[in-house]
Image: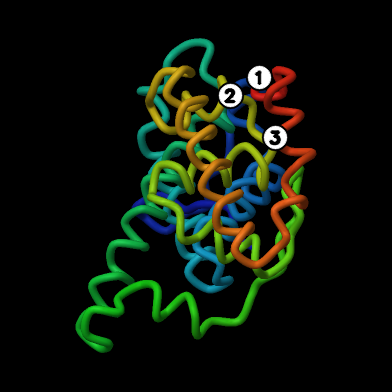
């Protein structure tokens, strides 16, 4: 679990008054869970969460009115995780030729996550991690973290329609991948919920 962020002098970041910042314990837990879901490795997730908290706090004056603290810090978490994944992909390419990140993912043990809607079998997790970046991010936010469509749109900096489109594509890809191993029925409830408007 990441610690409360520090400023550039190494001092703990503490809200000056009630409205200055949220409960850092709750916030850091949520940011860490997001990073863990995106990176699937506890040590990088811890580092990414800490970096996201520090960056978000350093730029807190830029937060627009009406943007929640979770959305603010979560956006930094998404961007930091993207940086971590790009770095890991480059490292994997240097050490494993063209196999890249997929070789790293295949060799790593599965980290337990707290699902919201998706069944958390290893096959499902692996299928999610093989999705294109934006589809994977949307799926993680919606079904592993429980973000609403509006929150996911704010976190990823795109319209809600784009979130819904990417989610439809992601679910279609997951169905196809799981059909190959005969377990596509595990996603039937997720698709039904989405079709009923569960994406908001």
Closest to the observer, 131 or 73: 131
The Cα–Cα distance between marks 2 and 3, rounded to whole angstroms, is 15 Å
The Cα–Cα distance between marks 1 and 2, rounded to whole angstroms, is 5 Å
Which mark, residue 149?
2
Q: Quadrant of the C terminus?
A: top right
Q: Which residue position holds label 1?
A: 200
Q: Secondary structure at mark 2?
A: helix
Query: Which residue sits at x=23%, y=79%?
Result: 98
Residue 199 pos. (x, y %): 65, 24
Question: Quick check: 37 left or right of 84?
Answer: right
Q: Quadrant of the N terminus?
A: bottom right
Q: Quadrant of residue 190?
A: top right
Query: Which residue sits at x=72%, y=46%?
Result: 187
Residue 78 pos. (x, y %): 44, 45
Q: Quadrant of residue 127?
A: bottom right
Image marks 1 and 2: residues in contact by CB distance under 8 Å: yes
Q: Which residue position holds label 3?
A: 191
Which mark, residue 98?
none
Q: First in sequence, mark 1 or 2: give its number.
A: 2
């Amino acid at each position: 679990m990441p610690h409360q962020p520090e400023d550039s002098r190494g001092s703990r970041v503490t809200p000056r008054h009630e409205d200055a910042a949220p409960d850092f314990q709750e916030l850091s837990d949520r940011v860490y869970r997001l990073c863990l879901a995106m990176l699937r490795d506890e040590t990088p997730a811890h580092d990414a969460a800490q970096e996201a908290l520090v960056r978000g706090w350093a730029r807190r004056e830029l937060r627009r009115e009406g943007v929640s603290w979770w959305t603010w810090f979560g956006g930094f978490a998404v961007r930091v995780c993207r940086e971590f994944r790009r770095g890991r992909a480059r490292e994997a390419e240097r050490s494993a030729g063209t196999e890249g990140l997929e070789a790293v993912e295949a060799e790593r043990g599965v980290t337990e996550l707290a699902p919201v809607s998706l069944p958390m079998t290893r096959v499902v997790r692996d299928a999610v991690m093989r999705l294109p970046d934006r589809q994977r991010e949307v799926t993680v936010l919606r079904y592993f973290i429980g973000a609403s469509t509006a929150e996911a749109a704010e976190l990823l900096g795109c319209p809600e329609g784009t979130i819904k489109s990417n989610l439809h594509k992601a679910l279609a890809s997951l169905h196809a991948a799981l059909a190959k191993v005969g377990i596509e029925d595990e996603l039937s409830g997720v698709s039904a919920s989405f079709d009923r408007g569960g994406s908001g």
